[in-house]
Image (cartoon, coloured by chain):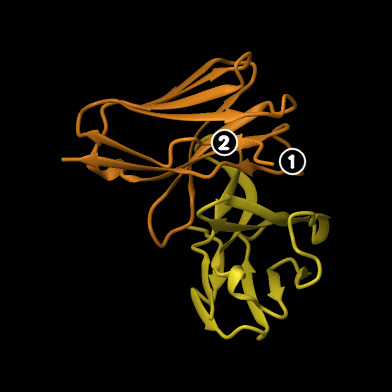
Amino acid sequence: DQQVKQNSPSLSVQEGRISILNCDYTNSMFDYFLWYKKYPAEGPTFLISISSIKDKNEDGRFTVFLNKSAKHLSLHIVPSQPGDSAVYFCAASGGRGATNKLIFGTGTLLAVQP
Amino acid sequence: DARVTQTPRHKVTEMGQEVTMRCQPILGHNTVFWYRQTMMQGLELLAYFRNRAPLDDSGMPKDRFSAEMPDATLATLKIQPSEPRDSAVYFCASRGWDARTRDEKLFFGSGTQLSVL
């Protein structure tokens, strides 16, 4: 049973435009959410996170929005750059503590066209 | 830059053979995770350890997979016997303090690409 779902396997966007990646979760105990980015032949790297006490967190060109009632979060990248082309994984956890496990989605492959 | 080190980077083996994947977590990180990346499941959590003790290995097929931490600098994931459906990329990650975000984060290794023929 997939507790974290990314329903779009891929997304193609023009350079300079906005990229919106979506993620849904089913477990209402999740209260901490993260996005990781993965380039080919490398491990995922942390991008941005949000706690359930917030509905928005921004870091430069990246903004994560959380809608708790809909159990939905999204990652906005503005403006998109070719170097953003990668697989993006959404992840969720029931807390930020060191013993809490991180559950990942299936990933969305973003292609930013020059 | 401290990083999680995984060996081997690539492994090709025949069905029925034993496979051992190794991971050196970042020094000082006490929580170590094993994930498997597949197209269908994304990043699946197989097992994780805290202070070398297993906390959860419910994601692992018990009959053929085993995970251990012989010491704080080494985590191993073994498959015996291996099967073609085990072909995937296996990632190790350790959790520790991220100075940039001032928070605890997962840091991933580069993975072991396993192909079982």
Residue at point 49%, 51% (across, down):
A44
Position of the C terminus of chain A by quadrant: top left
Position of the N terminus of chain A by quadrant: top right
Q: Which chain is orange?
A: A
**From what the image shows, is residue A32 above or below residue B49?**
above
Q: Which chain is yellow?
A: B
Examine the image and state in which quarter residue A24 appears: top right
- Secondary element type, mark 1: loop
**From what the image shows, is residue A24 above or below residue B46?**
above
State the residue position of label 1: A100
Comparing labels 2 and 1, the label whose residue is closer to the camera: 2
- Secondary element type, mark 2: strand
The three-letter amino acid code for the residue at tag 2 is Lys
Report, in whole angstroms, how far the alpha carbon at label 2 lies from the one at label 1: 19 Å
State the residue position of label 2: A5
Q: In this image, A36 relative to B103: left or right?
A: left
Task: Point out the residue furthest to the left here.
Answer: A114
Q: Which residue is more in the foreground, B61 or B107?
A: B61
**From what the image shows, is residue B55 above or below residue B25?**
above
Q: In this image, B95 relative to B67: left or right?
A: left
Q: Which residue is more in the foreground, A55 or A25?
A: A25
Residue at point 52%, 60% (across, down):
B3
- Circle 2 Cα neighbour tier, 10 Å, few/some/many (<14 / 14–19 / ≥20): many
Question: What's the chain of the residue with tag 1?
Answer: A
Q: Position of residue B65 (x, y in %)?
A: 74, 70
Q: Position of residue B13 (x, y in %)?
A: 56, 84
Question: What's the chain of the residue with tag 2?
Answer: A
The three-letter amino acid code for the residue at tag 1 is Asn
